[in-house]
Amino acid sequence: MSNSAAPLLPKTAPFESEQIAALNRILGTSTADQRQWLAGFLAGYAAATGNAASAPSPAPATEKRAAEPLTILYATESGNSEALALKIQALAKKRGFKPKAVDMADVMPAEIAAARNLLVIAATWGEGDPPQRAEPFYRALIEDGAPRFENTRFSVLALGDSSYVDFCLTGKKIDDRLAELGATRVAERVDCDLDFEALADGWTDTALDALKPADAGASAEIIPFDARAGTEPLADAPTWTAKNPYDAEIIEHINLNGRWSAKETIHLELDLGESGLAYEPGDSLAVVPKNDPILVEAILQATGLKGDSALEARLESELDITTLSRPVMEAYQKLKPHKALAELLAADGWRDFIADRQLIDLFMTFDAKLEAGELQGLLRPLAPRSYSIASSPLAHAGEAHLLVSAVRWQSHGLERKGVASIHMAERSKKGGTLPVFLKPNKHFRLPADHDRPLIMVGPGTGVAPFRAFLHQRQALEAKGRNWLFFGDQTFTNDFLYQLEWQQLEKDGVLTRIDAAFSRDQPEKIYVQHHMWEARRDLWAWLEEGAAFYVCGDATRMAKDVEAMLLRIIAEEGRKSPDQARAYLDDLNRTKRYQRDVY
């Protein structure tokens, strides 16, 4: 303010006229920081000279309402639920809540039954299963004897994959069960597919608004939620994501299977260059794939859209053209009604139809021509695929290695191919690039105690993270013993990394390896059979504090391995089935039982 501005002090101020003029000149040319300093100085002066009592009393503060407590409970396998929970926690705090994000693996229902406000973010894994780490909580909630939640207001966000028949089943069951146990649903459950961001945004805003106390006032600040945004973005760190992946150079591309193998397993080595990607053993690398151009052409031909180059480009790089699900069938039926399709959807026939079929089968079976917009409206975004990193950052500096099994099969008269695996096996070559970004997995980690023994079960490509574990332990000169169970089809053609295992044994890093080859004898032998044969030693390792890891197929292998592990605990530990389950639950809770299954 200039000297010509209106006086700051009125003529009635308790100063002489000359003092008022001097003060106005000083205050009129002062900055905000100077005035703030002066106010503090005068307050301090008054206190020091004993005149504080004569200082004007501050205006009475508006009564502050206690923050509303909020529990955000999450069940996670790949990390999406956890990431959402932490972001919602930050947002809820800004909206006046006192939020706490809680991993379902760390609590039991009785510990949260008194929660006044509860948001649940629950992922479904595989065919309707809860995430492995959340299984004890889930069982205790579903079974008889679960505590009542009569004073709890809640809402559920369910994450899943619509390519599975039991889409979002874990979230659906938790939602129903909480209501059965007396909780009050304040916002309807939302079921999310792989592209969950937009639905998560809407659910978060609706649920937080519903949980806001009635006396919070209409003036409370509403901050929109963005599921894609981090709570504390790092300004200097590169943000490689699905929409902005890093093009890593392929520096090695080797088929590890022998000439007569029925399989093709590719060992890929990627140069991370200047990406800044820093991973730990147990993390995954997500690959942004492209669809098979031959399948793209078939889709365009079947829908009468061949020749649309812009659509062709989108189908190749942006949209999922393989997944067939009930929602897709229902949407197609609305666009192009077919009596036979309506009959499938009216009963359970749709389940049999989608078994081992893909989108192209829908168009070929129920022929109809589509507009470009209609076809695109049926499709979800093409999702990245995650692969366990098979290398150690200490042993393979600046690189990330992947182990990829090329997926090919025949069904209903058509040749089928895996989207990402065939993209890497057939259309990616040494010297080319692969779009990738990091998917950390803090729930599949080496123990901090380098002396702790490890038992690792990894058939086929499931052995990838254990190659990383062993090379990391070797680089760290860890003293803990290491035992690997590996399985595949034949010893001669499918013993992946055989020479490396032998060298690690020679170096004293790999203490023991038990390999099962299912097709080398008339009867099928799998890793769980070798576990049973070695049950006494396995139990002894567990009792000595060993950590038990499983990586690979979730549908059969991981379940068979867990069933065998429970049998061994019961047999060798002289425990009942319930006691064996409690023992395994404790291993899970203390991070001595970890799985990375898919």
Image (cartoon, rainbow, N blue to C red):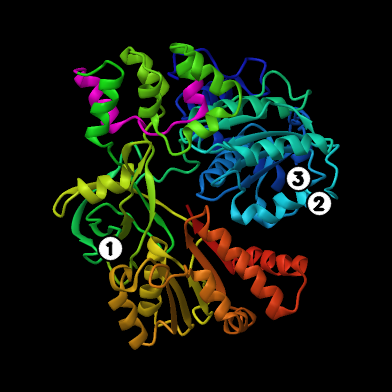
Observer-nearest residue: 9 or 176?
176
Decide which of 68, 133 is in the foreground and name it.
133
* Magenta span includes 196: no
Q: Which residue is drawn at 61% across and 47% down?
A: 129
**Residue of label 2:** 110
Reading the image, the residue beneath label 1 is 261
Residue projecting furthest to the left: 431
Q: Which amino acid does label 1 sit on?
A: Ser
Outermost residue, front side: 522
Choose mark 1 or mark 3, whichever is in front: 1
- The answer to whether residue 340 is above or below residue 233 is above
Q: Which of marks 1 and 3 is nearer the N terminus?
A: 3
Q: What element carries label 3?
A: loop
Look at label 2 and name its amino acid: Ala
Looking at the rendered structure, which numbered label has been put on residue 506? none
Residue 33 x, y percent position in the rendering: 49, 35
Label annotation for residue 50? 3
The residues tagged by marks 1 and 2 sit, at their Cα atoms, a distance apart of: 52 Å
Query: Disc 1 on helix, strand or loop?
Result: loop
Q: What residue lies at 49% left-to-right and 19% top-to-bottom?
A: 341
Position of residue 208 in the picture relative to residue 405 (left or right): right
> Is 324 included in the stretch rendered in magenta?
yes
Crowd band around label 1 with a 10 angstrom C-alpha radius: few (<14), some (14–19), many (20+): some
Alpha carbon separation for disc pair 1 and 3: 93 Å
Residue range of the region highlighted in magenta in the rendering: 307-330
